[in-house]
Image: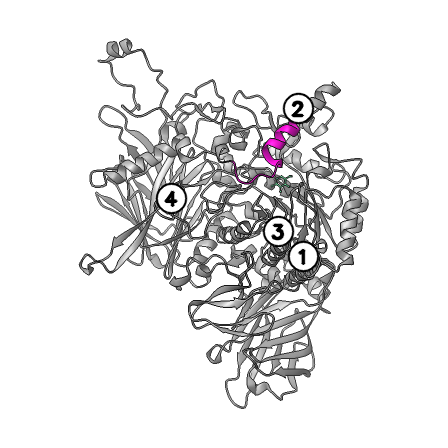
Amino acid sequence: MLLSWIRVDLLALLVCLLCNVIPIAAVKHENFKRCDQSGFCRRNRAIADEATSNEDSWASPYTLDPATINVQNGVLKGIVSKSLGEGYGPVSFPLTITFLESGVVRVSIDEEKRQKGDIELRHGSVARKERYNEASKWAIVGALNNDRRASPSMAAEATTIIYGPDNSYKAVIKHFPFAIDFWRANEIHVKFNGKGFLNMEHWRPKIEKPAKEAIEAKEDQQPIENTDAGEDESTWWEESFGGNTDSKPKGPESVGLDITFPGYEHVFGIPQHAGPLSLKQTRGGSGNFDEPYRLYNSDVFEYEMDSPMTLYGAIPLMQAHRKDSTVGVFWLNAAETWIDIVKTKVRTNPLSLGTGRKIDTQTHWFSEAGLLDVFVFLGPTPRDIVHAYSDLTGYTQLPPHFAIAYHQCRWNYVSDDDVREVDRKFDKHNIPYDIIWLDLEYTNERKYFQWDPHTFPDPLGMQTQLDAHARKLVVLIDPHIKNTHDYSVVDDLKSKSLAVRNKDNDIYEGWCWPGSAHWIDCFSPDAQKWWTSLFQYKTFQGTAPNLFIWNDMNEPSVFNGPETTMPKDNIHYGNWEHRDLHNINGLTFVNATYNALLQRDPKVPKRPFVLTRSFFSGSQRMGAMWTGDNQASWPHLAASIPMVLANNIAGFPFSGADVGGFFGNPEKDLLTRWYQAGIFYPFFRAHAHIDTRRREPYLAGEPYTKIITSAIRLRYQLLPTWYTAFHQASVDGSPILRPHYYVYPGDEAAFHIDDQFFIGSTGLLAKPVVSEGANSVDIYLPAGKTFYDYFDYTVYRGVGKSIPFSAPLEKIPLLMQGGHIFPRKERPRKSSGLMKWDPYTLVVVLGDENEMHAEGELYIDDGETFDYGEGAFIHRKFTYAPSISSNAPMGILRSQSLTPPSKESKKAKAYLQSMEHVRIEKIVVINAPSQWDGRASVRILEDGQRERNAGLRYWKAEGGKTAWAVVRNPNVGIGKGWKIEF
Ligand code: NOJ
């Protein structure tokens, strides 16, 4: 027996080594499909090729029979028919177009036969017969109210629906062939099936090819209904890749559609890919990709740069952008999906002889299975798209406050002593950190929920030491459960039938870190309930309330599976095939963990923190994500910025990359620059592979340790600003990091810029150094805007061009934009928890003469409970206005409450009281007016207090640096209304 277990473990080790452990130079391309290796990708591209090369004669075979159309309460229903050629078909596809109150339109197409279950599955499969119709159950949480006023007018060739804000939108639904044009302000912004690539692969039985003689004998018989003649069936049935065969019991089932954005040159979104934010063309040509962007959540470690290859997560949201207009689509499908992008030049005015050309962006989306289900957003700003998308899929979780501070991780801290020692060393070197992480090796032989008894004999003692400085521990729990004896978790999983099943309806077994393993099926409500029970303190012994969870490998990663994941013909709860829901799998696992953490302290629920690798639309509601296994290289550092930005504009801003790079050992300046960039990731965690050398910041040596420490301190100093940006994301989906096009949607020259970003709405603009040996960066500044160096107040005036900015190793390129106010905390502490009662500093950044107004916000709450839902928070708006007359004060700074009166609950009052002694200790005014020179004090009027003065000190402008002033200890309450007169 023992021998056989040793053998299993050795085998597991070998598989692991082959799959994931050995640092190698680049991604294994051969492990992942190209389009021509995926049957449905080939088939859909072939339709596009045929339609494009016969543009004049091509007719889409789909029509919408006007007699079937019925519009009621904002919903249009009808039947789309696909003609299969004379003597065949047609096939019926029920169409539903829903006009939502938000101005968003949802277009869904199902298939009648599959809907009715009127099909036969091959190979005795128990799989569900319908097209997967539960993606919305996981992804959508709101904003589905119908716009009952949407009004139709019907004509023979098209049905037109007027809808949206002030009835300014119009959907023209064409009947022959079926196509939809979406109009805003007398212009078409989005076109469905304008190119005729619509493809709904209908169910058909597999006809086993008879021998030649039999064909001749049967020649005069009727063809089988719904079976098309003369099609190439070579990719319809079983498909093999990398030694694995997909049995495809439902046959071909893909859905495809062309979506054109006329006049739009840029498209953004569809994370996760390692490439530029402005998506590239995918049909070849100089500088373009020749593969479509792929969305099929996979364990693609050491991924390559500038590639449309799939990665760990998928958000099928795309924004199309041009000067002052943004529109978007959300392709709600959880199956493997590919997206082609082609940009074509169009002459807008035929008489303009070569001038007046514009670009159309044509996109072509196709998924292997499921419904065609697409949401259309007509903008007109990027903000409108992100907000409307977030109203549907949910907002970023307001994380516990510690989670936005610095996370220290590696694979692995090897013992509880090791953790204690690292904790002490951070303190010794005065480097703040909040969370230390344990990777795989804390477990007892990779059995989750069990500590290694030899290396972690005292987990609670370890957590107590961390708690002394308000620090936390995060441990890894993966979805694969070791298939071994004497392990109650796997026994339960099996006996309660909570695992994913294989195509034969038996428990699925595959290989991952523990060797042989089974996978929890979190689509099952019973499995979720059971998962919750595993996280109770009495079950997961050795865990305290300051322990949180990392969910890794949840694509799911299966070392011996096709494309390192699960076979598509595996079966989940409800008998859905894995193929149907693959991209949602990771979300369901995090969802279960999130709920499990919530249930640990049911009396006073605390906000969970869960990190996920795999994600889908909606995952933002449950925690943070990171960009997986990158490398310690400059290109990976550079790529992390557009990757994190892509997540930010796609509704999942709580994102980051492994600081330092996962594989390999970073040179010290790379590590230093990575920290200087990483402090701007919303999720800021250092992590490293097991084979790398230790690289905690105190090990770097001088001057690196000092530089890294001050970078981390800058993150801590700005935590009030970060938390305010997180709060905004948590109420409307706003990106935390904002690319240039998002903030300046009219600044055409800079739409492509994806290596600099604004933090929330603070006017803070960062451009991390991401290239080796660079001592400066070029920062693009919009015309007419004034910026100041964060550290020395040097003035930079934007002229709509990039300007050089000196950035030797110790310098972080960070600018403040005139017109903004942001909060910070300046006292260095060991962790963010210890800063809770510290006083605030307000930084008021004034612009040029005609931009002397400024404003900003601050949001604070207890950082751990849900009491903010009952009003237990402080939300202030700060405004600065210059003098309006010569006998008035020279400027007034005000603090006003943004808390709605409805939030004045008991808890709200108690919270305000608890914050009464938290004050503002300093106000820094950048670009202070020269009239202030010589003034010694300001007048303070605080609610409920006597009028008083505070000292003012002024520094003149000199040598390219602007003037500035400091109000010393105004001592106004952070939660109070007040006014300061300059
Ligand atoms: C893969 C993850 O991407 C990586 O961060 C982690 O260290 C390893 N799994 C081991 O758990």
Residue 513's label in the rendered image is none
Disc 2 to disc 4: CB gap under 8 Å: no
Can residue 8 be seen here? yes
* Residue 766, horizontal then vertical, whole percent: 54, 63
According to the image, label 1 marks what residue?
863
Query: In the rendered image, which quarter contains the C terminus?
Result: bottom right
Mark 1: which amino acid? Answer: Gly
User: Residue beneath label 3, please?
Assistant: 659
> What is the span of residues highlighted in magenta in the rendered image?
12-28
> Which label is found at residue 495?
2
Of the two numbered discs 1 and 3 in the rendering, the one whose residue sits closer to the viewer: 3
Disc 4 or 1, which lies upstream in sequence?
4
Which quadrant of the frame does ligand 1 lie within? top right
| Quadrant (top left, top right, bottom left, bottom right) of the N terminus | top right
- Mark 3 or mark 2: which comes first in sequence? 2
Measure the C-alpha gap from mark 1 to mark 3: 25 Å
